[in-house]
Image: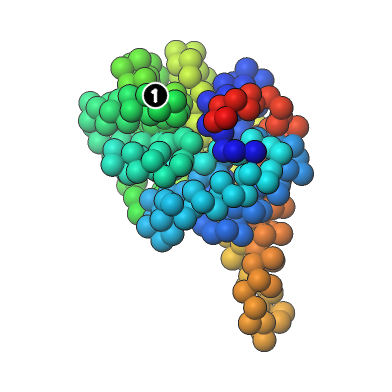
């Protein structure tokens, strides 16, 4: 089916008490793996690319790959710009066929973040495309951006932010980090519950790679409607390729290790979808979004 937006996916997740899995893809193989997992589990799915991935392959290339694979799928697939670094990039993504965008102004002060987020959200709304923003700083490194310290989201600031910007989903900081965790993450789950009480749009959890299944499930129960997974997919893909080449060092056909990567990523994505609770929820999305 044609690509759909994330609007109905996330609103229905919010109503149903589950989260949509959002998975970062770096190449065609990872796109295939993610959609195959969604098909097998009958789950709605979001495929994401970051600015550095786009720099590597271009918006048009990833849009074409995901659209082509989604057209063959029976489940709803959304293509999302993850950590959009500027107003210009968000505009380019929507023009290229992305059906959901994020503007990440979290490195700015509150007023600056609200200004750029509203600017993107206003244009996205006119195009009927959902817009995600981030408030607070998620630690670790995502793409080329590195947070030196964690600054958890303030509930009242979140309420004001949503009211003033018109964004349709909000990524919150509660102690998660991008990349793999060095130690055991300590999540401020009560903070998440407090944000949920004053913010009525779907909430997003970044930095989920490496969190325990229990932590992810608890965050979903407390109001998270979208969970991002990136680093662990890259690790699974790379591990599978390395193992194949160690076992069969004479392999020269890229398709051989591509298939190994697909199998590994598909298995991981299916596991994460089950933790999010979005398996079996494909029919919860109204397919009129982009038709």
Expressed as whole percent of the image width and height from the top left, the position of residue 97 reads 46, 42
Residue appearing at x 35%, y 39% in the figure: 90
Q: Is residue 42 above or below residue 237?
A: above
How far across and how far down the image is residue 268, in percent?
A: 68, 51
Q: Kindly state the secondary structure of the residue where label 1 is placed.
A: helix
User: What residue is drawn where x is 31% and y is 17%?
Assistant: 164
Q: Please, which residue is most extreme toward the bottom here? A: 250
Q: Position of residue 65 (x, y in %)?
A: 55, 53
**For the view shown, which residue lies furthest in the top direction?**
198
* Nearer the observer, 58 or 19: 58
The residue shown at (41%, 56%) is 58
What residue does disc 1 label? 125
- 206 and 78: which is toward the camera: 78
| Placement of the C terminus among the 4 image quadrants | top right
Q: Nearer the viewer, residue 66 or 83?
A: 66
182 or 264, which lies in front? 264
The residue lying at 35 percent from left, 54 percent from top is 144
Q: Is residue 90 visible?
A: yes
Colouring convention used in this rendered image of the protein? rainbow
Label total for image: 1
Q: Position of residue 143 (x, y in %)?
A: 40, 53
Residue furthest to the front in view is 291
Q: Quadrant of residue 125?
A: top left
**Relative to 24, is 123 on the left or the right?**
left
Decide: few, some or many residues near mark 1? Use Cα within 10 Å; few <14, some 14-19, many ≥20.
Answer: some
């Amino acid at each position: 089916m044609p690509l759909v937006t994330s609007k109905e996916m996330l609103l229905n997740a919010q109503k149903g008490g589950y989260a949509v899995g959002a998975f970062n893809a770096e190449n065609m193989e990872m796109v295939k793996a993610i959609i195959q997992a969604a098909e097998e589990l009958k789950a709605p799915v979001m495929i994401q690319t970051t600015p550095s991935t786009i720099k590597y392959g271009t918006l048009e290339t990833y849009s074409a790959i995901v659209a082509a694979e989604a057209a063959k799928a029976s489940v709803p697939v959304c293509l999302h710009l993850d950590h959009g670094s500027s107003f210009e990039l968000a505009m380019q993504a929507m023009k290229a066929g992305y059906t959901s965008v994020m503007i990440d102004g979290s490195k700015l002060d509150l007023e600056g973040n609200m200004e750029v987020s509203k600017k993107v959200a206003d244009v996205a709304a006119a195009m009927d495309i959902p817009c995600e923003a981030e408030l607070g700083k998620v630690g670790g490194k995502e793409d080329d951006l590195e947070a030196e310290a964690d600054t958890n989201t303030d509930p009242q600031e979140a309420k004001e932010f949503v009211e003033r910007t018109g964004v349709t989903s909000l990524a919150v900081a509660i102690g998660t980090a991008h990349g793999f965790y060095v130690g055991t993450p300590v999540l401020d789950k009560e903070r998440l519950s407090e944000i949920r009480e004053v913010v009525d749009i779907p909430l997003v959890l970044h930095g989920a790679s490496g969190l325990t299944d229990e932590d992810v499930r608890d965050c979903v129960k407390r109001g998270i409607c979208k969970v991002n997974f990136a680093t662990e997919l890259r690790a699974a893909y790379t591990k599978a390729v390395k193992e194949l080449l160690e076992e069969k060092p004479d392999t020269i056909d890229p398709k051989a290790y591509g298939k190994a990567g697909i199998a590994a990523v598909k298995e991981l994505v299916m596991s994460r979808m089950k933790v999010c609770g979005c398996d079996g929820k494909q029919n919860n999305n109204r397919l009129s979004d982009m038709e």
